[in-house]
Amino acid sequence: MRSGYGRSIFEPLLPLILGRDISGEVAAVGASVSSLTIGQEVFGALHPTAVRGTYADYAILSENELTLKPLSVSHVEASAIPFAALTAWRALKSTARIAKGYVKCYIMTM
């Protein structure tokens, strides 16, 4: 996207802030936010169709796009989790066809 991929789609939105994954500290909350407070460390991801991005000093996300960051995980590590986990989950659902209560085991030998 930085080099122009998707320019015809995003042209009306330019300049565009890229990025979906995020990890940081809650700086402010809206009046309807009930599960987060200022100062909490959180991580998450914007919905793929979001116009705004996370490659910025501050980003606006809804509380359902965030969760508390475990203390044992750094912000760098936490910010690498959301879309990697989503990609793995989609592979399990669509390729392995895993469902609730069902476990399939694949073993890859080298």
Image (spheres, rainbow, N blue to C red):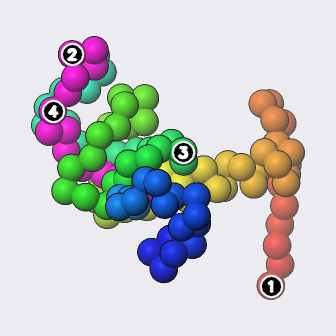
Earlier-in-chain disc, 3 versus 4 = 4
Residue at point 44%, 47% (across, down): 51
- Mark 4–mark 1 Cα distance, whole angstroms, equals 50 Å
Left or right: where 5 falls relative to 50: right
**Residue receiving disc 1:** 110
Is 8 within the magenta? no
- Compared with residue 59, is residue 62 higher up or lower down, i.e. above or below? above
- Mark 1–mark 2 Cα distance, whole angstroms, equals 54 Å
Q: Secondary structure at mark 4?
A: loop
- Mark 1–mark 3 Cα distance, whole angstroms, equals 39 Å
Q: Amino acid at mark 4?
A: Ala
Contact, CB < 8 Å: mark 3 with mark 2? no
The residue carrying pointer 3 sits among few (fewer than 14), some (14 to 19) or many (20 or more) residues within 10 Å by Cα, namely few
Q: Which mark is residue 28?
A: 4
Q: Secondary structure at mark 1?
A: loop
Report the mark closest to the observer, 1 or 3.
3
Q: Residue placed farthest to the bottom in the image?
A: 110
- Compared with residue 29, is residue 87 higher up or lower down, i.e. above or below? below
Earlier-in-chain disc, 1 versus 3 = 3
